């Protein structure tokens, strides 16, 4: 065993994440560790513990995608846990390994053991909450996130995830409360402002939502999703000029953002600019061949031009790909009024 490996293991057992980072960097620089996935995994653990999720994803790609790397890291983590059966940090690292290597369900046991052995640590509950959320068990996820927040009230990622889980349940007041706390804790986090804006918009508070989206864009002007969402709010308020600008800003940030092409197509259709609308809908379909709104828009254009069979073909595709029952009913009602029947 190399000195670097031994020092990394000592740091894991102690839960000394800063030390683990330093020692793992030294291990990777050593000729014997340059191609070893284990020091990279150690940094993946540190990044996750520190809430540096973008860095964690980069490290993950380097150490937990190849099957031989997963086997090597898994054997290392198992050996460490076998030597320290009463150490909560070793169980926590095992849980992270399993979750990060596509074994989410198996990670729940070591996370639970870590929570039992580390009763003052928020992290096992936070990671358990993520596993429950991915599995669609929102009540269990909320329970774990709430415990993480109770143990560490300043732990912004746990509050953010708690807010998302509340929002998924339609408990908007509780979601907004958590998002506001995240904004207070991390005012430069653009995602916190955009999540707050989304919840406010769902609640019907459009002006505060607009302001929160604007704040998010000041922090990250290249977020196409936020530009698009802001455009949707402007469109709802009848500010079609601002909506068009926001949709175009979304495309400037991401030219392959199909939903923005569709949205611009519908704005052009509303002004009876049929060729412009057709072009935008076709661009949308190049980005996503299952874009229901694009097919719907093309169907409307064919109907206006009296090409009923082509219109019907595209209405049928829109019905196939729409997930919103109201949109499907809208098309069906329209077809019945026209004396046609949709598939």
Image: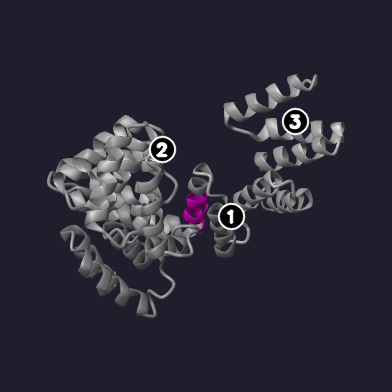
Dominant secondary structure, magenta: helix
- Determine crowd level at label 3: few under 14, some 14-19, many 20+ residues with C-alpha closer than 10 A: many
Marks 2 and 1 sit apart, C-alpha to C-alpha, by 21 Å
Marks 3 and 1 sit apart, C-alpha to C-alpha, by 28 Å
Residue 270 part of the magenta segment:
no
Number of callouts in the render?
A: 3
Task: Point out the stretch of residues depicted in magenta.
Answer: 224-231
Which label number is shown at residue 202? 2
State the residue position of label 3.
316
Question: Dot 3: what SS?
Answer: helix
- Residue depicted at 33% across the width and 35% down the height: 172
Could you say which quadrant of the image residue 18 lies in? bottom left
Q: Is residue 51 left or right of residue 271?
A: left
Indicate which disc, 3 or 1, sits on the residue closer to the N terminus.
1
- Determine crowd level at label 1: few under 14, some 14-19, many 20+ residues with C-alpha closer than 10 A: many
Q: Is residue 232 left or right of residue 93?
A: right
Q: Position of residue 175 (x, y in %)?
A: 30, 39
Q: Is residue 41 visible?
A: yes
Which label number is shown at residue 319? none
Q: Position of residue 202 (x, y in %)?
A: 41, 38
Whether 263 is drawn above or below 217: the answer is above
Indicate which disc, 3 or 2, sits on the residue closer to the N terminus.
2
Indicate which disc, 2 or 1, sits on the residue closer to the N terminus.
2
Quarter of the picture holding the C terminus = top right
- Residue depicted at 30% across the width and 46% down the height: 127
State the residue position of label 1.
244
Question: Dot 1: what SS?
Answer: helix
């Amino acid at each position: 065993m190399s000195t670097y490996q031994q020092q990394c293991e000592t740091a894991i057992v102690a839960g000394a994440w800063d030390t683990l980072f330093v020692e793992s960097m030294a291990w990777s620089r050593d000729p014997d560790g340059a191609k070893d996935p284990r020091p990279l995994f150690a940094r993946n653990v540190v990044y996750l513990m520190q809430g540096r999720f973008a860095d964690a994803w980069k490290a993950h790609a380097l150490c937990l995608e190849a099957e031989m790397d997963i086997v090597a890291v898994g054997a290392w983590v198992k050996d460490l846990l076998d030597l320290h059966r009463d150490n909560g940090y070793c169980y926590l690292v095992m849980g992270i390994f399993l979750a990060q290597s596509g074994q989410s369900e198996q990670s729940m046991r070591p996370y639970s053991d870590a929570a039992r052995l580390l009763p003052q640590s928020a992290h096992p509950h936070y990671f358990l909450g993520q596993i429950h959320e991915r599995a669609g068990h929102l009540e269990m996820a909320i329970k774990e996130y709430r415990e993480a927040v109770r143990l560490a009230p300043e732990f912004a990622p746990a509050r953010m995830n708690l807010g998302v889980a509340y929002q998924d349940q339609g408990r908007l007041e509780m979601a907004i409360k958590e998002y506001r706390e995240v904004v207070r804790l991390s005012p430069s986090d653009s995602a916190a402002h955009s999540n707050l804006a989304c919840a406010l918009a769902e609640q019907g508070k459009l002006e505060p939502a607009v302001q929160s989206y604007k704040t998010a864009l000041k922090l990250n002007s290249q977020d196409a999703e936020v530009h698009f969402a802001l455009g949707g709010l402007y469109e709802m308020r009848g500010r079609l000029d601002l909506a068009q600008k926001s949709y175009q800003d979304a495309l400037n940030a991401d030219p392959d953002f199909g939903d923005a092409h569709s949205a611009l197509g519908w704005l052009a259709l509303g002004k009876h600019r049929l060729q412009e609308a057709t072009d935008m809908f076709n661009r949308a379909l190049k980005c996503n061949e299952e874009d229901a709104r694009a097919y719907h828009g093309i169907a409307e254009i064919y109907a206006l031009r009296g090409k009923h069979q082509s219109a019907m073909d595209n209405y049928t595709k829109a019905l196939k790909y729409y997930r919103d029952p109201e949109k499907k009913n809208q098309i069906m009602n329209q077809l019945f009024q026209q004396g046609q029947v949709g598939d």
